[in-house]
Image (cartoon, rainbow, N blue to C red):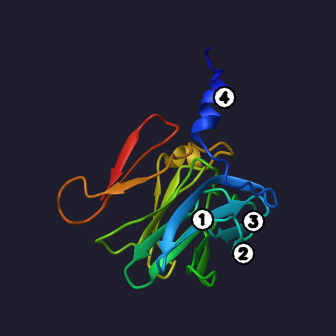
Amino acid sequence: STMRYEERTMSMLTHTWTRDKDKIAGCPAVAVIDETPIIIAGTTTGHIVALDGTGTELWRKSIGADVAAWPVVDDVAGIGRCILAADHSGMVACITPDGEEVWRTQLEGGFTEYNSISVVHGGEIAFVASSRRGVVTGLTVDGEIAWEFYTHPEHHTRKVGTGTGPCAVGDVDGDGRDEIVFSAADGYLYCLD
């Protein structure tokens, strides 16, 4: 007797819970905060929501329009553990693990689900964000704009931008500082130091 694919798959999994109260946008983050695992998710209503392992809401913070870039949880020098998120308009927020806002900054270009916010270690900037208009922005630990990199400035002035993908961050040249690597809709691969 042969089991159908659905029966075989479901027999290996346990459906623990489903949350339908929010329209979740993108991929959630999972982090351990004070030895407690939590799920951080963005919603299409512009909120960052923290849930415990049973799906119970711990807190909710509005960041503006619908959340676009997937939330990121990381340790940042000068802040400690923080949550980063961005909405479609380009608003980036840094939030503490208990839902308090650290800072909020409006960036040029806006975000889609294909853009990212990343933590950078070992340099003057603490965060980097990619946008749908082909702009990668470096932010200080206080959320101030340190620099903006335009993939192709001649495309940026048009209504249609070149768009950048998510940024990969890591020390690719062995100098002890993170570099920022990303691709753009122009077909180029970029590495910034």
Q: In front: 106, or 46?
A: 46
At label 2, counting other C-alpha atoms closer than 10 Å, the crowd grade (few under 14, some 14-19, many 20 or more) is: some
In the rendered image, the quadrant that contains the N terminus is top right
Residue sitting at x 37%, y 46%: 190
Q: Residue furthest right?
A: 21
Measure the C-alpha gap from mark 1 to mark 4: 28 Å
Q: Which mark is residue 60?
A: 2
User: Marks 2 and 1: in contact by CB < 8 Å?
Assistant: no
Labels 2 and 3: the sequence-earlier one: 3
Q: Nearer the viewer, residue 190 or 12?
A: 12
What is the distance, in whole Å, between disc 2 and disc 4 at their CAs? 37 Å
- Amino acid type of the residue that numbered disc 2 sits on in the rendered structure: Arg
Q: List the residue tagged with mark 1.
A: 39
Q: Tell me the quarter of the picture where residue 120 sits.
A: bottom left
Q: Tell me which numbered mark, 1 or 2, is placed earlier along the sequence.
A: 1
CB under 8 Å between discs 1 and 4:
no
Q: Alpha-carbon distance for marks 2 and 3?
A: 10 Å
Q: On the image, numbered disc 3 is attached to which residue?
A: 46
Q: Residue furthest front?
A: 1
Q: Are marks 4 and 3 in contact (CB under 8 Å)?
A: no
